[in-house]
């Protein structure tokens, strides 16, 4: 009997984000195992001499010039395991180790897998460092280790050491495995599901169309959509097509880049695993196996989609993930309105693209809510650039700026070619980081690492004079790294915003009717012809009659479908009514539903109601801002917030929400209904509306019940803390010890406290600082920062905060730190537009390195925002260390060899334009409310910075971004009142922290000590609960009091841990500290419970 060989598709880092919990990872691994087992290609010899498993480090090489797009996930090496099995050695035991959580055990039992569980072991050097940390117990594989077992790669589910579960299938019944699934027209099962309806933190409307082999997104891929996939355990790995509706702007595509990166990483890891497997197979002359998932991703959308993607080339770089972007630029039925050919077709579905033209927008200025320029007339001419843009350096960090390649202006085709080339290089490049090209030294574009070949042909680093910097550049030929081609394009050809909206009609293929043998027998056909007929071929009967399939098959089963109409702006309505598709019988037949994406601007327009009333044979389902209630989207995170609110109401608030059913406007209510997330429309095999799948509203009482019953101990500790902090004497003592801290009323709001990806409990990085009298400041601004703000403050107060926003600082270009900026800017513009005419909006400054500012500079072509009062402050390298004399030469060890990039960790940044430098700088204060900004480069990714902000009151706050601990940062942050430091890993994972260039808790605290920081707030956790230190508070306080009785005022460093939705005043750290024992108890218990649930275990890393 044969076992099937298993190549476990890499349970990649990203899969876990989509399947956020261990349960789903487990389930998916098991499912993929099951799939593998039913695939004929996987047969394996019964040779029992197991090969050593192939451990490979499948990390994707990243481009050193293009900043990596996202934090490397703090995860173990993703390692496909391939093992030969012997039929003789089938395990007979069926014992579940106690350490396996119940859910996993249930899953294993349910699937009748025999399994054992072992600590991780490996001879591979990738795991050696784990051993060094004492995490590994085995270094050698016992010879018989793999015999009779199929290993499933799982994630560590125990704190005390990474573990595998090794599982073997129960003996299978003798039956031939099914043939590999062939794509067949008219797949059997398919349905449409509403994934997102507009809420505060899921601003878009999104449909997901399911087929067995892949998924299609239709609608918006807004910020927060990916996190919804995680919340509802929708795997992103099968997502292969995205059809974006509406115009191209951040409201519709704000989550696109994050989602693409996630899907890319899932697929690239799976491919890498298969390649590795095939490499081994080829050695043994075995045929290759094929990676079954989607091989590429296709994105369809409106004009400027390519421009938007290409602008992200500064922070997106992947290899082996082809991405095609298709912009709808012309009306497919312009020439022939009767044409009913679909505009896109594959084995699952047919799609008709419907462009709604923005009528009257030619004369409309961009002033309204979001802009100030005429969309159609503006020509990109540097002299007409808004003032704000002038601060963009012509030279980017000393890099030579190449203008738009000659001849490309005004040439649409060439521009598209350029865009497609850039996009190809972003996702599917064949560029290699280590290729050296030879050229004359004086032609080398700096910064570049330069090499020379010595007399013996050996390549060494060139350290001599440099072109453009030194005199007497020798006339020699040198070798330089070939730059990433995308990096050579410093400025995309300009484009104009486009207001047209793309909509779709989507339909399944018709299926062939059922074969009726009786019909075939009537023509005297022999049985062997039946299968031909069933496949659609004609057969000639003995009497010469040609029997065609339609003579013997039941009538075809029509393919059903739906329309998705994105009409959020009044100026699209005329075009909607005029579209020819509505009268085209062939296109419209078997359409069952119209999904509408509406907005308050159009919801009362009678034209819409009339249209729906006229087409009343369809079901009309409405998704729209202000119509769908602002229900809680992320129940996991909100549940924790509600618990913490009950424990410490002053620091934690209940996320702003509305669970009341909202009604459609009276006009629409008679012809349409409101769509609810989760609801389905089954398209095949039958058509059925399935409201039963609607997501249940979150019960906001439950977390409190759970807290007071299950977590009674934590709750009681919290009550004690509440009592303590409400004691006026306590508050007075705190105030006394802090009297030298300025702005004790400054509020710190940790909007997103997780690293890498939005996850179930933590959103990605963003911290808001509100300093009364000066303004609000955002330190990093990851995806969905606006949504988090709205959950904390509600809509109106969020607008007030955004009007008060004086600076956004982006520490580095990993996607988890800045993808929320455009929507914050857009909302701020809208909030400012509502100001009374006599009130001038406050200026806003965006502070980052030129790469990020270059991205915004290109993105502004796509979405008209009010840029008139936004300035950019570019952080440029000085090459000096904090200890250097500012007017003297550079540090000795920063010679020309190191000049490369001028962004060495540990060196200082200067502000550009220079008028903002100097201390004190009036220009800086009037622009930002700040007295000074100091920053330095840190060891994380190229161009990563940490910064120190000082207000005129003396308040000093240091923010680390992501980094290894930095002495330079400690130096410039000396005397900080607050240090906000990343703490991606717990102390025991110091090896991971070094490898991924992050900090551990102790390292972060050490920086705080060096700074003499009075308060430390740890954040940016690797999607886990932090291991909270529990200070012995009463003892500390006694010491404090005894000192304060003496000469010195007693104060000590207070350390807190950030949670999403937490807001705390600077003068409240000691109050919040009182709740640490309660929180520690709560999260300790939650962690244990979720072990049981198989939930939340991804944090154990
Ligand atoms: Zn980072
Ligand atoms: Zn990060």
Image (spheres, rainbow, N blue to C red):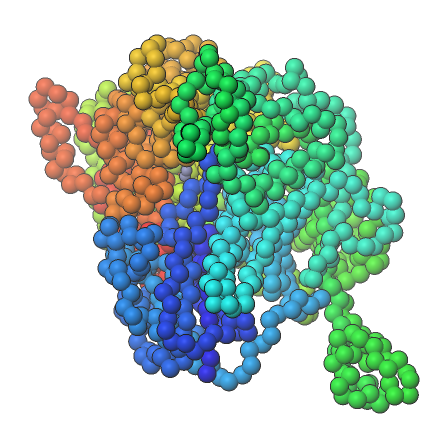
Q: Quadrant of residue 346?
A: bottom right
Q: Nearer the viewer, residue 938 or 680?
A: 938
On the image, the x and y values in percent for residue 957 come to 33, 25
- Left/right of residue 1036 with respect to residue 426 in the rendered view: left
- Residue beneath the point at 83% across and 80% down: 539
Q: Position of residue 587 (x, y in %)?
A: 80, 57
Locate residue 34, reporting x and y percent.
49, 71
Give the residue displayed 34% in from the left and 70% down from the top.
146
Identity of the residue drawn at 25% across and 44% down: 987
The residue furthest front is 456
Q: Along the horizontal axis of the image, is 624 left or right of 411?
A: left
431 or 38: nearer the eye?
A: 431
| Left/right of residue 950 with respect to residue 493 in the rendered view | left
Which of the 4 image quadrants contains residue 500?
top right
Which one is in front, 701 or 303?
303
In the drawing, does residue 850 fall left or right of residue 1078? Answer: right
- Return the x and y of residue 389 as percentages of the image width and height: 57, 20
Q: Quadrant of ligand 2?
A: top left
């Amino acid at each position: 009997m044969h076992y099937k060989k298993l190549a476990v598709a890499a349970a990649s880092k990203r899969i876990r984000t989509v399947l956020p919990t261990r349960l789903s990872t487990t389930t998916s691994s098991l499912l993929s195992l099951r799939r593998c087992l039913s695939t004929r290609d996987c047969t394996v010899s019964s040779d029992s001499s197991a090969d050593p498993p192939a451990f490979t480090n499948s990390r994707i090489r990243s481009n050193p010039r293009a900043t990596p797009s996202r934090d490397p996930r703090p995860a173990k090496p993703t390692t496909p395991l391939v093992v030969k099995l012997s039929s003789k050695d089938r395990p007979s035991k069926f014992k579940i180790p106690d350490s396996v959580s119940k859910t996993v055990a249930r899953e294993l039992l349910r699937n009748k897998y025999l399994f054992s569980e072992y600590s991780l072991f490996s001879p591979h050097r990738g795991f050696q460092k784990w051993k060094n940390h004492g995490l590994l117990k085995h270094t050698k594989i016992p010879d018989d280790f793999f015999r009779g077992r199929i290993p499933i790669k799982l994630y560590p589910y125990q704190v005390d050491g990474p573990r595998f579960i090794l599982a073997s299938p129960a003996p299978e019944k003798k039956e031939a495995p099914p043939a590999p699934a062939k794509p067949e027209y008219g797949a059997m099962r398919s349905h449409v599901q509403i994934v997102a309806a507009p809420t505060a933190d899921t601003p878009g409307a999104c449909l997901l169309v399911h087929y067995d082999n892949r998924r299609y997104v239709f609608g918006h891929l807004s910020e927060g959509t990916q996190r919804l996939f995680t919340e509802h355990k929708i795997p992103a790995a099968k997502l292969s097509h995205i059809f974006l509706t509406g115009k191209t702007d951040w409201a519709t595509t704000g989550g696109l880049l994050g989602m693409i990166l996630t899907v890319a990483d899932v697929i690239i890891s799976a491919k890498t695993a298969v390649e590795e497997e095939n490499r081994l197979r080829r050695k043994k002359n075995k045929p290759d196996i094929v990676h079954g998932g989607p091989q590429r991703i296709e994105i369809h959308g409106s004009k400027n989609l390519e421009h938007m993607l290409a602008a992200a080339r500064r922070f997106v770089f992947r290899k082996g993930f082809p991405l095609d972007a298709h912009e709808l630029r012309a009306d497919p039925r312009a020439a022939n309105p009767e044409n009913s050919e679909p505009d896109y077709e594959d084995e699952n579905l047919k799609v008709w693209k419907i462009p709604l033209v923005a009528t009257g927008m030619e004369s409309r200025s961009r002033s309204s809510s979001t802009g100030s320029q005429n969309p159609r007339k503006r020509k990109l001419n540097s002299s007409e650039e808004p003032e704000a843009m002038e601060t963009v350096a012509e030279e980017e960090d000393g890099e030579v700026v190449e203008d738009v390649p000659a001849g490309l202006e005004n040439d649409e085709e060439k521009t598209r070619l350029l865009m497609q080339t850039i996009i190809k290089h972003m996702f599917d490049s064949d560029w290699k980081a280590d290729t050296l090209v030879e050229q004359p030294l004086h032609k080398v574009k700096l910064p570049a690492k330069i090499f020379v070949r010595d007399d013996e042909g050996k390549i060494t680093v060139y350290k001599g004079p440099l072109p453009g910097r030194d005199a007497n550049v020798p006339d020699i030929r040198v070798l330089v790294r070939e730059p990433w081609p995308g990096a050579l394009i410093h400025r995309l050809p300009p484009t104009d915003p486009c207001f047209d909206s793309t909509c779709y009609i989507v339909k399944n293929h018709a299926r062939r009717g059922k074969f009726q043998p009786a019909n075939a027998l009537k023509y005297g056909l022999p049985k062997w012809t039946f299968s031909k007929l069933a496949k659609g071929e004609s057969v000639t009967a003995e009497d010469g009659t040609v029997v065609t399939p339609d003579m013997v098959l039941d009538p075809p089963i029509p393919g059903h479908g739906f329309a998705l109409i994105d009409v959020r702006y009044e100026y699209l309505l005329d075009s909607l009514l005029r579209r020819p598709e509505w009268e085209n019988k062939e296109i419209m037949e078997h359409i069952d539903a119209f999904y509408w994406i509406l907005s308050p601007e159009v919801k009362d327009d009678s034209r819409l109601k009339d249209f729906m009333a006229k087409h009343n044979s369809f079901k009309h389902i409405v998704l729209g801002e202000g119509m769908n209630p602002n229900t809680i989207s992320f129940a996991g995170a909100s549940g924790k917030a509600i618990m913490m609110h009950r424990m410490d109401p002053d620091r934690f608030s209940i996320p702003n929400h509305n669970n009341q059913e909202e009604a459609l406007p009276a006009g629409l209510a008679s012809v349409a209904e409101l769509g609810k997330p989760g609801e389905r429309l089954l398209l095949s095999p039958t058509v059925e509306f399935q409201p039963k799948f609607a997501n249940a509203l979150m019960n906001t009482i439950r977390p409190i019940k759970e807290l007071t019953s299950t977590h009674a101990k934590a709750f009681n500790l919290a009550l004690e803390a509440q009592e303590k902090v409400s004691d006026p004497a306590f508050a007075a003592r705190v105030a006394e010890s802090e009297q030298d801290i300025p702005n004790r009323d400054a509020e710190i709001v940790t909007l997103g406290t997780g690293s890498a990806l939005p996850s179930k409990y933590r959103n990605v990085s963003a911290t808001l600082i509100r300093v009364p009298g000066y303004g609000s400041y955002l330190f990093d601004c990851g995806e969905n920062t606006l949504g988090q703000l709205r959950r904390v403050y509600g809509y109106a107060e969020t607008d007030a905060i955004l009007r008060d926003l004086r600076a956004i600082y982006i520490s580095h270009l990993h996607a988890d730190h800045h993808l929320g900026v455009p929507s914050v800017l857009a909302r701020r513009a809208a909030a400012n537009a509502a100001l009374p005419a006599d009130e001038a909006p406050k200026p806003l400054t965006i502070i980052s390195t030129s790469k990020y500012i270059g991205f915004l500079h290109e993105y502004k072509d796509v979405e008209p925002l009010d840029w008139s009062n936004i300035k950019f402050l570019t952080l440029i390298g000085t090459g000096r260390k904090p200890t250097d004399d500012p007017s003297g030469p550079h540090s000795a060890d920063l010679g020309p060899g190191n000049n490369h990039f001028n962004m060495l960790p540990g060196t200082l940044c200067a502000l550009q334009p220079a008028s903002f430098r100097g201390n004190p700088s009036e220009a800086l204060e009037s622009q930002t409310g700040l007295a000074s900004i100091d920053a330095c480069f840190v060891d994380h990714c190229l161009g990563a910075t940490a910064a120190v902000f000082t207000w005129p009151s003396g308040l000093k706050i240091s923010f680390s971004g992501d980094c290894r601990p930095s002495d330079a940062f400690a130096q410039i942050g000396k005397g900080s009142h607050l240090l906000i430091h990343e703490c991606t890993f717990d102390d025991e994972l110091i090896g991971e922290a070094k490898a991924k260039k992050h900090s551990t808790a102790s390292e972060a605290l050490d920086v705080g000590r060096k700074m003499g920081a009075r308060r430390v707030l740890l954040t940016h956790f690797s999607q886990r609960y932090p291991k909270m230190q529990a200070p012995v508070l009463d003892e500390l306080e006694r010491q404090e009091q005894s000192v304060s009785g003496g000469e010195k005022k007693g104060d000590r460093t207070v350390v807190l841990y950030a949670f999403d939705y937490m807001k705390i005043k600077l003068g409240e750290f000691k109050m919040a500290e009182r709740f640490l024992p309660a929180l520690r108890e709560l999260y300790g218990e939650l962690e244990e419970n979720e072990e049981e649930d198989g939930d939340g275990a991804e944090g154990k890393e």
